[in-house]
Image: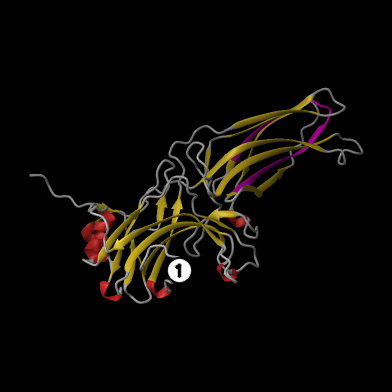
Amino acid sequence: MASLSFPVLSLPRVFKKTSGNGHIALYLGKRDFVDHVDSVEVVDGVVKVDPAGLDGRKVYVYLACAFRYGSEDLDVIGLSFRRDIWIKRVQVYPPTDGNNSKSPIQEALLKKVGEQGCPFAFQMPTDLPCSVSLQPGPNDSGKACGVDFEVKAYIANEPNNIDEVIEKKDTCRLMIRKIQFAPANNKAGPKADITKQFMMTDKPVHLEASLEKEIYYHGDPIIVKVKVNNETNKIVKKVKVSVEQLTSVVLYSSDTYAKAVCTEEFGETINANSTLEKSFQITPLLSNNKEKRGLSVDGRLKDEDTHLASTTLSQGDKEVQGIVVSYKVKVNLIVSSGGLLGGLTASDVTVELPLTLMSPKPAGECSVLPIQLFLRNFS
């Protein structure tokens, strides 16, 4: 006879929010949902409904992805500083379909909630952005601008009637995050080179730069290998290595903003008709950019620590709306002609490399618990 085995859950805790009138309560097993590029984890949960307090109305749940470009306290004279990128609504009470299949998370929640539990599930498309916030300035107040995701349960007569006033006491909501982790397979890093010729010289400067690998994790040092062949009569005064964050805001149009998140200058002198081959190390950190307004950081649910926004991974040529983040490494050679006017006639040679900056997938994302243990500790 086969031995019995219990389903396993990755639920170290449960997230719950109850409406002001106590007639509905929203339950989620987690608040971080992983985007695997070709698919996104299903957002599933349960709403506990007390039919006695509905007065003939229905209960709906929506999942919304929105771009917030102004603080809520600026919402005056009826202007909205929030634009929905994607929204999906479902009716959970009374139930409308005969689909009885439930996820292990929903099964566990329903065992605790009881007969008043109504399950729901949303499948997000793959072209939605990840949760990203734009870092406010030192004197800014209110909620930061950026992309966020909200699960909201509410009591109403219709799912989306603009003329129907839904009171706050009839709603409950939880913010969630859509996140991406670095792929498991790390490939060889990019390489780029450039040859530049200056006036008054018939020989060029050749610059080559490369990265050891394609993907770097937040907080890890980035090793940039640089090769220089200076065939000119000019002098390379120093080598400047920087990392730039590129934030593309894709809404009504596409605008891209570049901000340096790490810049290091190395006093490497390369004389005329000389070569250099050396590796330079830089580490872009949010802690060194706390005052930089408009910098993209990974979304956060409360005031927990975060880091620079991760590179946005997308599938093929599919355009992602909202905020798209990328990075590049720039290597500059500051070249001087020497002599009395050397500083005044300085020029530079620049090469750029794409950089993927992300978080690794946690080795033990959550503890694995049998349903019975989960329910015993759930209150």
Q: Is residue 46 visible?
A: no
Q: Residue at x 28, y 69 (%)?
A: 49
| As drawn, 246 above or below 138 | above
Residue 376: x and y, percent? Answer: 23, 65
Would you identify the image quadrant in which residue 200 lies?
top right
Residue 61: x and y, percent? Answer: 36, 62
Q: Residue at x 27, y 53 (%)?
A: 103
Q: Identify the element where label 1 is drawn.
A: loop
In the rendered structure, the answer to whether residue 136 lies left or right of residue 105 reads right
Counting the numbered discs, the total is 1
Most frequent secondary structure within the magenta stretch: strand
Q: Residue at x 64, y 63 (%)?
A: 137
Residue 222: x and y, percent? Answer: 58, 42
In the rendered structure, the answer to whether residue 171 lies left or right of residue 193 reads left
Residue 163: x and y, percent? Answer: 45, 68
Foreground: 207 or 130?
130
Decide whether residue 178 is among the magenta residues: no
Q: How is the image coloured?
A: secondary structure
Residue type at mark 1 is Asp
Instruction: Write down the region rendered in magenta.
Output: 223-248
Q: Is residue 120 visible?
A: yes
Quarter that holds the N terminus: top left
